[in-house]
Image (cartoon, helix red, strand yellow):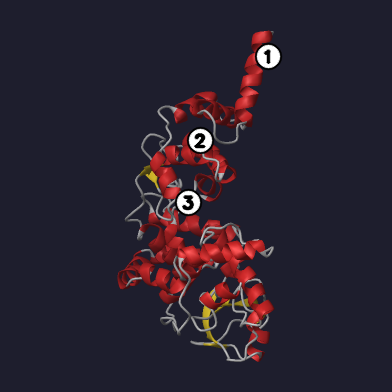
Amino acid sequence: MRLALALTLLTTAAHAQTCGGPVDSFVAGIKAEATAQGIPAQTVDQFFSGAQIDQKVIQADRAQGVFQKDFISFSRALISQNRIDNGRIYGNRYDATFDTIQQRFGIPRGVLLAFWAFETDYGQVQGSFNTRNALLTLAHDCRRPDLFRPQLIAAIELYRRGGMDPATTTGAWAGEIGQLQKLPREIVQQGLDGDGDGVVNLKTSAPDALMTGANVLSSLGWRPNEPWLQEVTLPDNLDWSQTGLNHKASVGDWAVRGVTARQGSLGPADLQASVLLPMGRNGPAFLAYPNFEVYFDWNKSFVYVTTAAYFATRLEGAQIYNAGNPSAPLTGQQMQQLQQKLTTRGHDVGGIDGILGAKTREAVQAEQARLGLPADAWPTLDLLNQL
């Protein structure tokens, strides 16, 4: 009786260990959770055979300095003529798949081509990290266990279905698999067979990867046959405090305020949209439609999302954006100083990380308005000094 009670308590304790601590104990908790969800114990044991923590994954997770770049620098680094040319080539090569996606989901090919280019260079660079070990490492690490623990469980289920081999399947350091770099939970829930062979394989089948990517976007709320981002020209007298993703108005209202399309015409007048100024009122300007918000469920980085959405418009025929003449961006150290000052003033900036994310932008805009500065949410050295 006492032995049985002790084993029960041990299993319960391991199950409650949501992150950190002895790896063996952590894995025991994951195994208990997986079997409780109906995955056979033998399958779970086979999945973890040979599993180990990968310190290179932790190093990669802590070294995401690329997202500290400003929009112009980031977009120019990611968008090359080669990627544009290959976008046309792959768009033509998988024309039938893209047509099916357009008919079924209402998602233009440029949207998926942009993700395909940025994630893996159209399937050419899919990552060499062991997927199981990467997910185990990130689930055990206590920085984001709420994100990666469910993904580790999903990977076990994916293995049970024959969708991955824990010993040999490789991908990105964050556990994404395949040509569009999707996490196991997305593959389990939204994976689609795009080439009709009865198997969902996101690593070797571009149609499978593209159809799955479209299904993911659809499940996240993509509104069929609506725009997502459009470059615009703004009047000098626009109320800058009403710009940013935290402020919305109808397209018709923006038109009345003097917002015009730089190319073509604005979207439907009744659509809600935000004026997006990635680098302030003197830099590129866009109108962000409801579908733009879906991008943040694919990737949380503001600069990545804006670049991916813009590149999609380029692949659909848009011209190169007008870079304007924005004020120089703050350095990473200056951005952290600014975030600290904003936090001291009671703003939630989402962490002192040197990254100009949505919360930092909102705080900057609020302080600009308070100080009587143009409230365009672009932090400048003048603002830093005034604070």
Tell me which label, 3 or 1, sits earlier in the chain: 1
Dot 1 corresponds to which residue? 5
Looking at the rendered image, the quarter that the N terminus falls into is top right
Look at the picture and state if 161 lies above or below 322: above
Q: Residues within 10 Å of mark 2 (few under 14, many from 20)?
A: many
Q: Of the residues shown, which amino acid type is indicated by label 3? A: Lys
Q: Under tag 2, what secondary structure?
A: helix
* Image x and y of residue 50, in percent: 40, 28
Depth check, front residue: 242 or 268: 242
Q: Of the residues shown, which amino acid type is indicated by label 2? A: Ile
Any part of residue 36 in sight: no
Dot 2 corresponds to which residue? 156
Looking at the rendered image, the quarter that the C terminus falls into is bottom right
* Image x and y of residue 308, in percent: 46, 67
Look at the picture and state if 382 lies above or below 43: below
Any part of residue 195 in sight: yes
Q: Nearer the viewer, mark 2 or mark 1?
A: 1
Dot 3 corresponds to which residue? 182
Calculate the distance from the C-alpha at mark 2 to the C-alpha at mark 1.
28 Å
Tell me which label, 2 or 1, sits earlier in the chain: 1
Calculate the distance from the C-alpha at mark 3 to the C-alpha at mark 1.
41 Å
Q: Residues within 10 Å of mark 3 (few under 14, many from 20)?
A: many
Left or right of 123, for residue 313:
right
